[in-house]
Amino acid sequence: MKKVFVKVAKLASTLPALLFSGAVFAQQRIPTSQALNLSEVIDTLTDWLLGIGGGLAALILIIGGIRYIAAAGNEKQITQAKNTIIYAIVGLVIIVLAFVIERAVVGAFKPQ
């Protein structure tokens, strides 16, 4: 059990760097002389929310995998771990669909 805990601790210490490394390079500088319009505010807000949701869904997927490995043949724990993995994948699919829909809606209202 100690080995599993050490592996989980190592994974948990590197997970923030893996999840949020793209956010550092994706930042945009918005000139202060320009006023933000509503579509830009919605676009920025949804990017942040979808990024956080995707990171949480990925974290839950990893936790489900660890629970599956640590189940050690216990059928009840294996079923719970499988359900966690399934729900995390469904969450990721919903987040990707929300991203696609948001891009289409904001793109339709963006000034040309």
Image (tube, grey):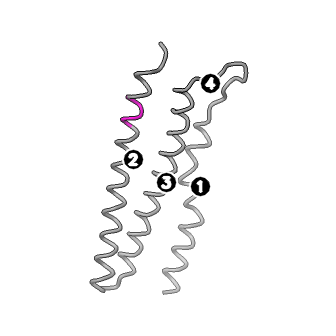
Q: Quadrant of residue 30?
A: top right
Instruction: Give, as a three-letter code, the residue at label 3.
Output: Gly
Q: Which mark is residue 36?
A: 4
Tell whether label 1 touches label 4 (CB within 8 Å). Answer: no
Marks 1 and 3, Cα distance to the nearest angstrom? 11 Å
Tell whether label 2 touches label 1 (CB within 8 Å). Answer: no
Q: Earlier in the sequence, mark 3 or mark 2?
A: 3
Instruction: Give, as a three-letter code, the residue at label 2.
Output: Ile
Disc 1 marks which residue?
17
Tell whether label 2 touches label 3 (CB within 8 Å). Answer: no
Q: Nearer the viewer, residue 94 or 67?
A: 94
Residue pictured at 39% horizontal, 47% vertical: 95
- Badge 2 marks a residue whose secondary structure is helix
Marks 3 and 2, Cα distance to the nearest angstrom? 10 Å
Q: Earlier in the sequence, mark 2 or mark 4?
A: 4
Q: Which residues are magenta?
A: 100-104
Q: Earlier in the sequence, mark 1 or mark 2?
A: 1
- Badge 4 marks a residue whose secondary structure is loop
Q: Magenta span has 74? A: no
Tag in front: 3 or 2: 2
Is 84 displayed left or right of 45 in the figure? Answer: left
Residue pictured at 51% horizontal, 45% vertical: 49
Q: Nearer the viewer, residue 11 or 54?
A: 54
Total labels: the figure holds: 4
Disc 2 marks which residue?
95
Disc 3 marks which residue?
55
Tag in front: 3 or 4: 4
